[in-house]
Amino acid sequence: MPLKKIYKVLRKQWRRFKFARTVNWYKTIYFNYKMFPKHIARKLPVFFYGSVKFNSLQGKVTIDAATIKRGMIGFGQNYEMNKRSMRIAEITLDGHLAFKGYCQFGKDYFLNIMDDAYCEMGNMASLGSRGKIICSKEIKFGEYARIGSESQLIDTNFHAMINTETGEKSEMKGSIHLGNYNYFGNRISVYKDTKTPNFTTIASHAVLKKDFSDVPENTMIGGIPAKVIKSNISRDWEGERAMIENALMIDF
């Protein structure tokens, strides 16, 4: 065998070895065999990278995809600029977590899906490092709904609020629906009753808490509270598709 070919083979094996060291195999195997039937669990569709605390795994996880592949869903996946973790990732899963395909969570995520709640992650959806999802009723990510680091999605007020003049109580829980091909910057807060159309861009530090369904596609939303700030603008999804897929889809 030529030396050049030997070098390529060894380099590939070395990369696989380095990647394998980043996977938390104990949590990966435990989660897959606890949450899936054996014929799915043995494929190890969910990978955990680094430290994570399982507060509760009493809910259920489903994957609705044409093909289930190893590591297609990654928690703590290293795809961003920051390479160090604070080791504070937590999962509380008492409701239903549904995946429609590939998905990734960055480092130090916080995921809490409460009793009877439903959280759906569209194909190629993601939540960046130090992101937070608190789902008490329903949160849905569309396809390629990609959320920047240090953002949070919370569909509940946690506490009952009352109008002191009329005595009317506001709803504590709501729903969040994110459209397909949504690009969110960093440190964005998304609260109950938020809906976004397809091909929407959300500027960093925005606060969303209403229905934007009547906003045209290819619009940028930003501000506190969020409003339309620019029209006829979109992330170059086709131009960056290969980059996104290379960062998300592992070959192991």
Image (cartoon, rainbow, N blue to C red):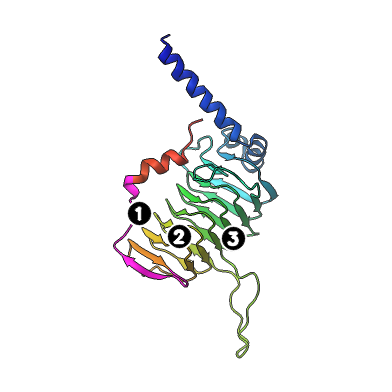
Q: Does the magenta run of residues contain 99?
A: no
168 sits to left or right of 190: right
Q: Residue at x 53, y 67 (%)?
A: 191
For marks 2 and 1, give the one nearer the viewer.
Answer: 1
Q: Residue at x 59, y 53 (%)?
A: 96
| Secondary structure of residue under mark 1 | loop
The residue lying toward the viewer, choosing from 106 and 3, is 3
Residue range corresponding to the magenta coloring: 223-239
CA distance separating discs 2 and 1: 16 Å
x%, y% of residue 89? 64, 49
| Secondary structure of residue under mark 3 | strand
Q: Which residue is mark 1?
A: 235
Q: Which residue is mark 3?
A: 135
User: Looking at numbered disc 2 in the image, what kind of residue is underneath it?
Assistant: Leu
User: Looking at numbered disc 3 in the image, what kind of residue is underneath it?
Assistant: Cys
For label 2, the crowd category at 10 Å Cα-Cα, with few meaning under 14, some 14 to 19 and many 20 or more, is: many
Q: Which residue is mark 2?
A: 178
The residue lying toward the viewer, choosing from 173 and 13, is 13
94 sits to left or right of 180: right
